[in-house]
Amino acid sequence: MGVLDVSLFGDYTAASRFEERFVALDARAVLRLAIQDLYPGRIALVSSFGADSAVLLHMVSTIDTATPVIFVDTGHLFPETLAYRDELVALLGLTNVQAFSPTPEDLAAFDPETFLWSTNPDQCCEVRKVMPLGRAVDGFDAWITGRKRFQSDTRAALPLFEAEGTRTKINPLASWSATRILSYLDAHDLPRHRLVAKNYLSIGCIPCTSPVKPGEDARAGRWRGKSKTECGIHLGVVSGGAGI
Ligand code: SF4
């Protein structure tokens, strides 16, 4: 199956056919296939430069260091995350990391007191994450995520290929375990996000991230005490002007 199939059958059909055909490939082979054959010049890796991000960033760097890497800076990130981004970019030689942030106009309109995370976290994520990401992926036909099934119950059925409107999302690490992630990081001598040593196993924004206790899901520290479990970028079709 190639690009022609995507245009002929639409992305829902393409995603399910890709899943059927390529589900047995290992993660790096999936990435190489997607970057070089299925979506050449039309695919980006979306990375939070969080706890497990070095795995996909390293794999992508071994395929093409000029692959677009999208980083959404919400304005509420840990300084350790920004330092880790800079460290990995230099170490892996990534040449096309693109940062996207909420616009000053949106912040002035929706979060003038920078307290929206407390009063309306869904709207805060919409303004600070979903809309910037929507602008970032505009023009791409596919994007790569680092989500894994083990991270939470809500991700337990995560496929390798997913349709998202007219785009395809690819989750090369969907079947990976926490142990396998650690083994990969060790085998390639990759640095760790400094907050991992403090039991932050999934790292987002400062106000909405806390350490994880033994036995908890990796994402249990996100929006702790609230019913919210996802920021919204994986709950629908991302768009630069959506949702508010
Ligand atoms: S994770 Fe928290 S601070 Fe970050 S965008 Fe969402 S609600 Fe706002």
Image (tube, rainbow, N blue to C red):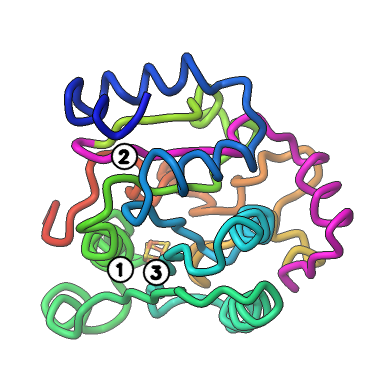
Mark carried by residue 235: 2
Using a 10 Å C-alpha cutoff, classify the residue at mark 2 as few (fewer than 14 neighbours), some (14 to 19) or many (20 or more).
few
Label 3: which secondary element? strand
Residue 51 at x, y = what percent? 67, 59
Residue positioned 46% across, 41% down in the render: 34
What's the residue type where badge 3 is placed?
A: Val
In this rendering, which labeled residue sits more in front, label 3 or label 1?
3
Which corner quadrant holds the N terminus? top left
Image check: 181 left or right of 118?
Answer: right
Residue that mark 3 sits on: 72
Ligand 1 is within 8 Å of the C-beta of the residue at disc 1: yes
Using a 10 Å C-alpha cutoff, classify the residue at mark 3 as few (fewer than 14 neighbours), some (14 to 19) or many (20 or more).
many
How many tags in the picture?
A: 3
In space, the residues marked 3 and 1 are separated at their CA atoms by 8 Å
Residue 80 at x, y = what percent? 64, 79
Which corner quadrant holds the C terminus? bottom left
Query: Closest to the observer: 146 or 216?
Result: 146
**Residue 111 position (above or below residue 137):** below
The quarter of the rendering in which ligand 1 is drawn is bottom left
What's the residue type where badge 2 is placed?
A: Leu
Q: Which residues are magenta?
A: 165-194
Residue 36 at x, y = what percent? 46, 47
Residue that mark 1 sits on: 128
For marks 3 and 1 on the same chain, the one whose residue lies earlier in the sequence:
3
**Residue 152 position (above or below residue 126):** above
